[in-house]
Image (tube, rainbow, N blue to C red):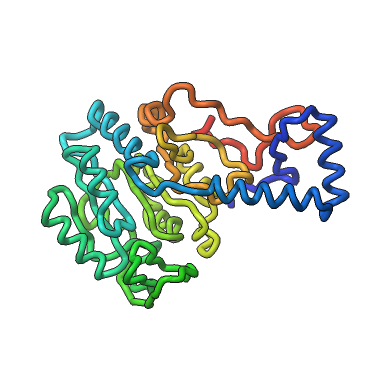
Amino acid sequence: MSRRPGPFPGVWPSGLPPRADRALRDWVRRHPDARVVRAARGAVYGALSVLHTEDHCPATNGEAHVLRCLARATGADHRSSRGPVLFDVGANRGAWAVTALDACPGARVHCFELVRPVRRRLHRLAAERSGIVVAEAGLADRPGVRRVKYYPACDELSSLYDYPHEARSEWRDEPVLRGDDYLSAHGIDGVDLLKIDTEGAELEVLAGFRQALGAGRVAAVQFEYGYSAILSGSLLYRSYDLLGPLGYRLGRILPQRVDFRPYTLFDERFFGPNFLAVHRSRPDLVRLLAGRGTPVARRLRRPGAAGATGPFPATDAER
């Protein structure tokens, strides 16, 4: 980590007047096991469970909106005659790739999938739909062979990590590449959108693109964020800490906009399902994605503080 949260990571505002807020917090601090406190915690946990219900359909959860904005931005000001170059890492059976081609006519989608039986299905899709390229390996932080937990009946759950799904699974050895090596081998100068859905291995994939990310050759990165991050250690703050200093502005993808904002410790709640990072060289794309009327992120305050403080200061790209 290049930035550490200070001793007061901030307190989420209760909405009460300051004096009432302090009194309530003091009372709860002294009575952590009181019946009313236990009941309140149960109600809050139940509400969080409901709020954690996520839409994984690209057509309705904001992913298609991101693609439409990308098509509009690249169509208006593209650096060459080629269509957008998109990477689908964790492509599974190609649903996102098809959505991308529908939204971005003329795009070329490079699909990466860890498990060989699923790659065979992708090859069949590529034979039917022009614009899809299927790589013969998954992506990780270094080339080689990795153990993959494969779920034959639920192959979208396959992962480098031992997530405790109840479905039947088996371990397989599968080849992996670094993203930077793939770009070099195929003569690809830049990527308009790098989409990553790898069940916890998102940071490993990003590490394999370190050269391209550092050079600003990846305009935007979409990555999944959920409970699998606990097993892999791919917490949200690590994505901010990796991408922020490289000039990327990050936010959660919502159905009609991207909620760009600096990171706070309260964001580590595994609410996704997807986040987006846009390089500072594409302010046009940020404007399209943020939309009109996007609320300014409210920085959290510690009790009694005169100014707003956050766990991490905003990066240059976020100011």
Which quarter of the picture shows residue 287? top left
Name which residue lies at 21% across and 40% down. Answer: 102
Let me know if residue 315 appears in the view: yes
Quadrant of the rendering where the C terminus is positioned: top right
- 138 vs 46, left or right, is left
Q: Is residue 30 left or right of residue 215?
A: right
Q: Is residue 270 left or right of residue 304?
A: left
Quadrant of the image occupied by residue 19: top right
From the top left corner, tell me how far across and down residue 148 is, in percent.
Answer: 38, 72
Does residue 293 lie above or below 304 as drawn? above
- Where residue 85 sits in the image (x, y, percent)? 24, 44
* Residue 210, image x, y percentages: 40, 52
Residue 318 pos. (x, y %): 52, 33
Q: Is residue 53 above or below residue 82?
A: below
Question: Viewer-proximal residue, 43 or 124?
Answer: 43
For residue 301, what is the image quadrant? top right
